[in-house]
Amino acid sequence: MMVWAFNASVEQSRRILNIDHLPFLSKFYLQFFSFLNKCAFRGVEGRMGGKSANIIAMVLGYLSNLFCLFGFASTAVLCFVYYVFDRLCSQITDFSDSSCLDFTVYEPLLNKPLKLCGGDLQQFCVLSSTAYIWYIVGFIGCLITILGLQHFLMCSAANYSRVSFGMRAEELKEV
């Protein structure tokens, strides 16, 4: 979805500015990155900058991982709640005024009568089954995101180790 939104934004700005093709941009990128590779990322200063950038990336990765773990736990609880609602609704055969779901146990929490019958019960059941499916999708998405962040943190730790040992190797060469 975000990719579609980004592509739409790029297309919108391209149409507003009447830009059809930017051939010089790829050459500029190539020159810029080759300059960075030859000049900026060489020597001790480049390694120290890489080390500090890696530390910042790892800290942000850990914070993102904690945030995603919170989302994972929240969606797990919501999946369970909506699973229970979906099972309650699957036992109801008709949505007449005689068939009701009685949630009066939770009435002191909300100060409202919680007895669903007829059309309200039908809407509750339809929304419960829809929400249950979307919470499962969110649960799987959180799991995939957490696995991706764990992989990113492993790669960042390996990169940090490589940069740190590279600095030690430079120090040993000087001795």
Image (cartoon, grey):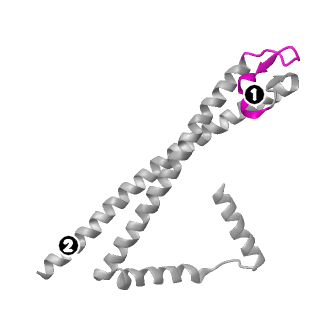
Q: Can residue 103 be seen?
A: no
Q: Quadrant of residue 44?
A: bottom left
Mark 1 or 2, nearer chain start: 1
Q: Residue at left 34%, top 71%?
A: 51
| Image coords of residue 151 (percent x, y) | 41, 52
Q: Amino acid at mark 1?
A: Glu
* Highlighted range, magenta: 91-111
| Image coords of residue 32 (percent x, y) | 47, 83
Using the image, tell me which numbered label, if any, was put on residue 40. none
Using the image, tell me which numbered label, if any, was put on residue 168. 2
Of residues 164 and 12, the one nearer the viewer is: 164
Q: Residue at left 70%, top 36%?
A: 131
Q: Is residue 55 above or below residue 94?
A: below
Q: Disc 1 on helix, strand or loop?
A: helix
Q: Is residue 35 above or below residue 84?
A: below
Q: Is residue 158 magenta?
A: no
Q: Residue at left 42%, top 67%?
A: 56
Q: Which residue is mark 1?
A: 107
The quadrant of the image that shows the N terminus is: bottom right
- In the image, is 137 to the left or to the right of 27? right
| Image coords of residue 149 (percent x, y) | 45, 53
Q: Residues within 10 Å of mark 1 (few under 14, many from 20)?
A: few
Q: Residues within 10 Å of mark 2 (few under 14, many from 20)?
A: few
| Image coords of residue 145 (percent x, y) | 51, 49
- In the image, is 117 to the left or to the right of 2? right
User: Mark 1 and mark 2: span between their CA atoms?
Assistant: 66 Å
